[in-house]
Image (spheres, rainbow, N blue to C red):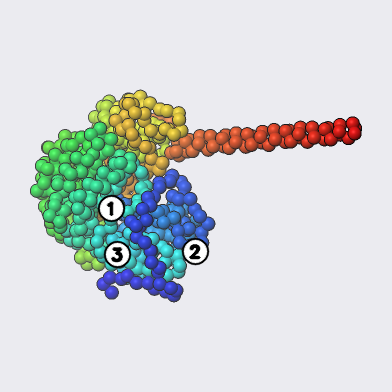
Amino acid sequence: MEDIEDLVGAGAPPGLRLPVTAIGIKAKRKPKSRLLSDPVSPNPQIPGTQTIYLKTFGCSHNQSDSEYMAGQLSAFGYAVTEDPEQADLWLINTCTVKSPSQSAMATLIGKCKTAKKPLVVAGCVPQGSRDLKDLEGISIIGVQQIDRVVEVVEETLKGHEVRFLNRKTLPSLDLPKVRKNRLIEILPINVGCLGACTYCKTKHARGHLGSYTVESLVERVKSVISEGVKEIWLSSEDTGAYGRDIGQNLPVLLNAIITELPPDRSTMLRIGMTNPPYILEHLKEIAEVLNHPCVYSFLHVPVQSGSDSVLTAMNREYTVSEFRTVVDTLKELVPGMHIATDIICGFPGETDEDFEQTINLIKDYQFAQVHISQFYPRPGTPAARMKKVPSTVVKNRSRELTSVFESFSPYQGMTGQTLRIWITEIATDGVHLVGHTKEYIQVLVIAPDSMLGTSVDAKITSVGRWSVFGEITETPVFVEDAAHLGRPLAGSSNSCVNCECSEDPMPCQCLGENSCGQQISSTEHEGHTNTAMNGSHGEITFIASTKSMPPRKRRPQGESNEINLVNNQEAAQMCSKLAAIDWILLGGIALSFITSSVVLILLSSNLFS
């Protein structure tokens, strides 16, 4: 069938369920180390009492989809966990960009079958490859059916195989959502794209361009700001193409959003990945937005190759000259502008001369972030049928480009500068907090967790090839009251005086994949400041040197609050118990006294009589 939406297997048909929007329940965020909702004893006959293991592969758009699915499951009573062992069902949100991510999915499916756990596979793989052998006998849900995840999970737990792949209207932006980092909202502004790149498998899954309305996106921005979000990422397969299907364009959307951002700069906006063709006509308007105080001066613009002949074979719909126009214009109009880009090494037909042109392009601009990947042929794409470059040549080119990139010193000269940073994450070393400058340069600082969600001035103390270290120059004001711990006081030096620090800050290192399929160790596929490339495999790894900084053991966020609260509750319960015992003792004494008095009176009356 072209669209599959059926129920396979024995048993009764799925029962009627009220839509999520009719319930009016909002998911509550719990610490990462715990279940997202208090588990009830699981009963396969009672929906909403089971625990779900949710695993996500791929880009920030996939991460947003997972957060929406987790929110709906939590709203219906399911507990969502990151521990597969304690789960009653596994839910895998997949990525189809390149082979390694799909191979990882296949491995996880095998583990799930070995563990004899019910399984649901979501995301781009089932949507783009519905007949894949690995998916036989497994419930699947497509990228535009995430609002039906509760139905799929319930029926799968009953032993049914369910497939929801029918394309329909875009999922609502107001579905319950559980963010991985409660300070960061990943906001999808559209799905699909207008391109037809010969190597891209994602188009098979996400389809043609479909944009959300400006009004719905602005309302979402208002909502998440009121919830305490401090950073908004606009996410898409191609941000620059936004609105072309509904008579709008990206500058109109961006200007509508920035009018809603708090003037104290407590919430920042980051524009997502955009391909060159669709921003060429809006460069000046985009530059004006990037100059706004509440917008990071950062953009991810993939070039993929420095050769026009290779770009033509890729069907990228732009030339190297046009890419240079994008970069030159933005750097001229936006002070301190940082641009990240992507390169695919060894695309079919790439000659030594083509590759040399790519090397020269990267040398000309010395980008601080270059996401380097070897070419991976994806089944069903035109590039998979093209004559391949020998694998040894591809690996050597990847190593050579990586070596060139690693020779740059993009952060040289920053030492001693005092810059404003926005702190939203805890680094994976457990020692530092992660902040970003206006140019989205990542700065690692040692500070208490209560600084999460704030913006402060930091002096850059040292720089390396991959890391920038700083120290906070402002003196934060702290309170000991557990009810306020982790929040800056009103009137403090922090510009964000009403923030609530994340109970579950997302680490600065999480495995993702960008638009051309290379693995990135960063917060999101659209670019992260401190990245390094593995030359032989084209993988990017987060590297942070902490030799000069003594490590310290960081207590998990919110743990100290919880300990104080628990101690206070225990003390209150103890006092309550003591008070009850005292009253019982007093009552007993009083009763004994009354009984003794009555006995004496009776004895006296008998004697006198």
Residue 239 shown left or right of residue 542 in the figure: left
- At which x and y percent is residue 556? 45, 39
Q: Residue beneath label 3, please? A: 127
Q: Which mark is residue 365?
A: none
Residue 38 shown left or right of residue 522 in the figure: right
Q: Quadrant of the C terminus?
A: top right
Name the foreground residue: 16 vs 418: 16
Cα separation, mark 1 vs mark 2, equals 31 Å
Residue located at (23% from left, 39% from top)? 261
Q: Quadrant of the N terminus?
A: bottom left
**First in sequence: mark 3 or mark 2?**
2
Q: Which mark is residue 173?
A: 1
The answer to whether residue 597 is above or below residue 116 is: above
How dense is the environment of label 1, judged by Cα within 10 Å: few (below 14), some, or many (20 and up)?
some
Q: Is residue 535 visible?
A: no
Q: Residue beneath label 2, please? A: 44
Q: Tell me the element at label 2.
A: loop
Number of marks: 3
- At which x and y percent is residue 145? 31, 62
